[in-house]
Image (tube, rainbow, N blue to C red):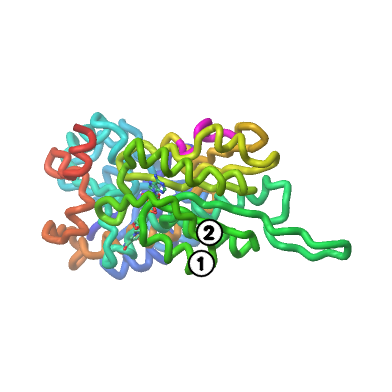
């Protein structure tokens, strides 16, 4: 029967893509699970909670003993080099990281699926790792901001008066941004949202937030945004300046696939914010939406604290591991027939997620970006 291998995650990673429920579902498909000892400790999943799995002592043993390897974050180069033709690797593979990285995976001859590339179509929603993890990120951004804000989020009436609610502005209203808006609303803040894709207005408003219209519309391919022209960037900054200055909390989540994060908020715009304002730049790892952001750090810009958090889903590994494992189960299920691995290349979801196959980088979008 097919063996699903779960190597330990990289050192800084708390999530692990397996939970007991998913082990049971895999058994139902005729698949077995081979887990590296200790791999799930940081996600608080005990060996007992996983149920009927087999154990290996090293990543090399997991790779050698499995047909399909599930990973959160990258395997080390040395471990990845041990993949073999006919074997499948799937998970978050940072496909756009560099040509060397993609070519090294291709050179193993293994078939690799980078779930970052999953087509965003309805049928693929249950497999959508970017969505499940993005929603955790948006939620965490608001908690980070609320914990640092020198103000209440909600309106509060007390014996001597009334406290006005905080103003939260969320720039980028994709999966993470919408979850940030919903979370800030639940905490009672006055929330505004902004995005370049026109359809986001209705989504922002349906959460009870106000939409900031800059007049810049930039829908791209596959439901994503496109990069803005220099004129559009200027127009956007001019239109957003007042909303940023009025906000107590600014959360930015804007991204364009395969590109550096767009710089939307300048240093001058942050300097115009009130003392004690908090900025959480979720795009920090990709360069940042805010000028002056540093990934993994908190810096002072004018009177504002600018936080550039990294690996936000890793802050809540119990739920994000569960979501990740269920997403991978949904992606893997159609590939297992009668306990055997069989890949239907006619399926647009499968073909569209493939990064490498038969020794080549097969994803056209990645090949184009990496050149
Ligand atoms: P993302 O992480 O790539 O980007 C985050 C947001 O930043 C996007 O909403 C984008 O429009 C916005 N953005 C980019 N440049 C910007 C700029 N200069 N200024 C302001 N905002 C900017 O996107 P995502 O959250 O992964 O989702 C992207 C799309 O995929 C959305 O349309 C979402 O609804 C869709 N989606 C579809 C499915 C599905 O049907 N299976 C699942 C999830 C998401």
Is 289 in the magenta? yes
Residue 193 visible at all: yes
Q: Position of residue 21 (x, y in %)?
A: 42, 66
- Identify the main secondary structure in magenta: loop
**Mark 2 sits on what residue?**
181
| Left or right position of 118 against 16 | left
Quick check: is the Cβ at mark 1 less than 8 Å away from ligand 1? no
Q: Position of residue 25 (x, y in %)?
A: 34, 68
How packed is label 1: few (under 14 Cα within 10 Å), some, or many (20 or more)?
some
Circles 1 and 2: CB distance less than 8 Å?
A: yes
| Secondary structure category for the residue under label 1 | loop
Range drawn in magenta:
288-298
Name the residue rendered at 55%, 37% in the picture: 269
| Left or right position of 201 against 366 | right
Is 358 in the magenta? no
**Residue 166 appears in which quarter of the rendering?**
bottom right
**Which of the two labelled residues, at mark 1 and mark 2, occupies the earlier sequence position?**
2
Q: Quadrant of the N terminus?
A: bottom left
| Left or right position of 157 against 78 | right
**Mark 1 sits on what residue?**
207
């Amino acid at each position: 029967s097919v063996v699903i291998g779960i190597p330990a995650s990289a050192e800084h990673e708390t999530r692990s893509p397996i939970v007991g429920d998913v082990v049971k579902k895999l058994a139902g498909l005729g698949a077995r699970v081979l887990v590296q000892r200790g791999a799930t400790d940081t996600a608080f999943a005990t060996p007992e909670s996983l149920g009927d799995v087999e154990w290996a002592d090293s990543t090399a043993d997991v790779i050698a003993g499995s047909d399909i390897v599930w990973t959160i974050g990258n395997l080390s180069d040395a471990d990845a080099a041990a993949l073999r033709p006919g074997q499948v690797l799937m998970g978050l593979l940072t496909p756009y990281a560099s040509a060397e990285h993609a070519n090294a995976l291709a050179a193993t001859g293994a078939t690799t699926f980078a779930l970052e590339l999953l087509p965003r179509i309805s049928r693929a929603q249950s497999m959508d790792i970017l969505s499940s993890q993005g929603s955790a990120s948006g939620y965490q951004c608001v908690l980070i901001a609320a914990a640092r804000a020198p103000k209440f989020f909600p309106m509060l009436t007390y014996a001597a008066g009334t406290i006005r609610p905080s103003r939260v502005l969320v720039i980028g209203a994709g999966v993470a941004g919408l979850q940030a808006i919903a979370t800030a609303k639940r905490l009672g803040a006055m929330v505004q949202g902004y995005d370049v894709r026109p359809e986001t207005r209705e989504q922002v408003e349906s959460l009870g937030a106000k939409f900031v219209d800059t007049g810049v519309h930039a829908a791209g391919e596959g439901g994503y945004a496109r990069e803005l022209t220099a004129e559009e960037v200027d127009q956007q900054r001019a239109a957003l300046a007042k909303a940023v200055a009025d906000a107590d909390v600014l959360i930015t989540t804007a991204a364009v696939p395969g590109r550096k994060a767009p710089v939307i908020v300048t240093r001058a715009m942050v300097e115009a914010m009130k003392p004690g304002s908090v900025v959480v730049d979720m795009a920090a790892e990709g360069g940042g939406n805010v000028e002056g952001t540093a990934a993994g750090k908190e810096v002072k810009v004018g009177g504002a604290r600018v936080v550039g958090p990294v690996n936000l889903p890793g802050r809540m590994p119990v739920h994000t591991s569960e979501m990740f494992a269920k997403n991978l189960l949904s992606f893997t299920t159609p590939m297992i027939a009668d306990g055997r691995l069989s890949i239907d290349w006619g399926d647009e979801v499968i073909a569209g997620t493939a990064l490498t196959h038969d020794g080549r980088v097969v994803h056209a979008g990645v090949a184009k970006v990496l050149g």
